[in-house]
Image (cartoon, rainbow, N blue to C red):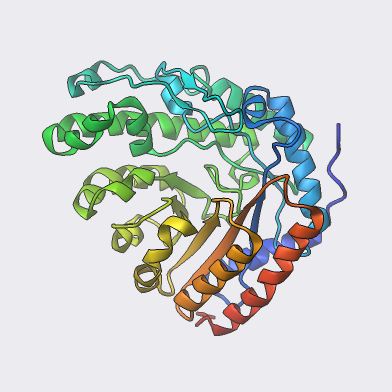
């Protein structure tokens, strides 16, 4: 088994300080560049999801590649990821795998086609049901077998509305907002309780929230007390009134206890003007560059001096597309908002490619930082 190469603790702490300062809008010499490296060259995604030991082996290899090839910003992390649908499996739903072993799994079918059925749902146990025992086992394994300077992501649980999407027949998900709002609130209250319980077990298995990058999937290290995280991809498909009633209250319960946190929505962002109404002092958005780039003017207006935005390059963009995209982000958000690029790379990127794309982006990130209106 490959071992993690020597890590310079002082260097990791310096990089963490840069991110901490960025969250507080205190001056830094460059906007950090995030890298998320996956590897499906030895074991395809399905084998990694089903066999935690193989996923762990791949993650250790990826950490070492990043440590060797990224001269700054990278804070080592590993990710325990069995799929997106942990909470759906806790309610008894089965996983569905397609023919492509590198295609992410989903939940098979749906559980509910009549909103009256939500009242008969029983609350599952966060330690024993569905995929959670697998998650807990491998979070604990990562904690025990990795140096303290390697952080661990939380589990990709989605969010309350993402879970509702898995449980409900597709059309029912949207008609229930208008036709059965009480039943929808009952369902969201239940799945939020379950997710709060899951987060508690995730934190316990990881050895404390300080060992996590955040409470959910984001691999970019967040400082305390900004570890909260919730996904709300469904909010891309409805308007502000529904977001206010059916997203914000339940998202807030998952962010409770943190004075800072992040929301994930790939995009678009029809309710961007409401994101910072969440009960946090510091707020971040994690989104996809492809699906949120048209919202950059809106995001600049809403996040000015108060929030950070992570733009995921997660659609197989080539190096030149990433460079152009980051230039577009910097030009569109400066001098008011920090936009951090997060690169999704895989085994097809050579060591030289990884080092090269970081070098290409670093010059942009330094110019961008010089233009930001810092608070201190």
Above or below: residue 122 compared with residue 324: above
190 to the left or right of 9: left
Above or below: residue 133 compared with residue 60: above
**Residue 74, position in %: x, y?**
71, 58
65 to the left or right of 228: right
**Residue 321, position in %: x, y?**
58, 64
The answer to whether residue 371 is visible is yes
291 to the left or right of 47: left
Above or below: residue 26 compared with residue 60: below
Q: For the N terminus, give its image quadrant.
A: top right
**Residue 132, position in %: x, y?**
53, 24
Residue located at (19% from left, 29% from top): 183
Residue located at (48% from left, 48% from top): 228
329 to the left or right of 241: right
Q: For the C terminus, give its image quadrant.
A: bottom right
The answer to whether residue 256 is visible is no
| Pick the front one: 26 or 207 | 26
Above or below: residue 152 compared with residue 47: below
Residue located at (17% from left, 35% from top): 175
**Residue 182, position in %: x, y?**
16, 32
Image quadrant assignment for residue 39: top right
């Amino acid at each position: 088994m490959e071992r993690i190469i020597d890590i310079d603790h002082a260097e990791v702490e310096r990089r963490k300080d840069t991110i901490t300062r960025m969250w507080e809008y205190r001056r830094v010499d460059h906007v950090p560049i995030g890298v998320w490296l996956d590897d499906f060259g030895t074991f395809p995604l399905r084998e990694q999801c089903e066999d935690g030991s193989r996923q762990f082996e791949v993650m250790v290899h990826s950490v070492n590649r990043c440590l060797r090839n990224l001269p700054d910003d990278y804070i080592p992390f590993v990710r325990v990821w069995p799929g997106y649908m942990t909470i759906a499996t806790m309610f008894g739903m089965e996983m569905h795998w397609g023919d492509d072993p590198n295609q992410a799994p989903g939940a098979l079918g749906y559980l509910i086609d009549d909103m009256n059925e939500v009242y008969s749902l029983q609350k599952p146990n966060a330690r024993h049901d569905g995929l959670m025992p697998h998650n807990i086992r491998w979070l604990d394994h990562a904690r025990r077998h990795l140096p303290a300077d390697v952080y661990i992501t939380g589990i990709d649980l989605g969010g309350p509305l993402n879970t509702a999407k898995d449980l409900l027949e597709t059309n029912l998900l949207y008609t229930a907002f208008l036709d059965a709002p009480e039943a929808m609130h009952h369902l969201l209250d239940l799945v939020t309780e379950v997710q709060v319980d899951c987060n508690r077990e995730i934190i316990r298995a990881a050895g404390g929230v300080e060992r996590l990058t955040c409470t959910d999937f984001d691999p970019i290290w967040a400082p305390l007390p900004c570890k909260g995280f919730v996904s709300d991809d469904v909010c891309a498909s409805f308007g502000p009134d529904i977001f206010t009633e059916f997203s914000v209250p339940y998202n807030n319960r998952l962010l409770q206890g943190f004075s800072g946190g992040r929301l994930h929505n790939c995009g678009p962002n029809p309710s961007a003007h409401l994101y910072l109404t969440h009960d946090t002092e510091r707020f971040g958005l994690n989104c996809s560059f492809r699906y949120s780039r048209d919202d950059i003017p809106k995001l600049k207006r809403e996040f000015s001096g108060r929030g950070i935005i992570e733009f995921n390059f997660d659609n197989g963009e080539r190096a030149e597309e990433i460079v152009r995209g980051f230039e577009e982000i910097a030009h569109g958000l400066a001098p008011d908002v920090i936009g951090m690029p997060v690169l999704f790379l895989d085994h097809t990127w050579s060591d030289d490619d990884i080092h090269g794309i970081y070098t290409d982006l670093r010059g942009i990130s330094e110019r961008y930082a010089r233009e930001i209106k810092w608070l201190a």
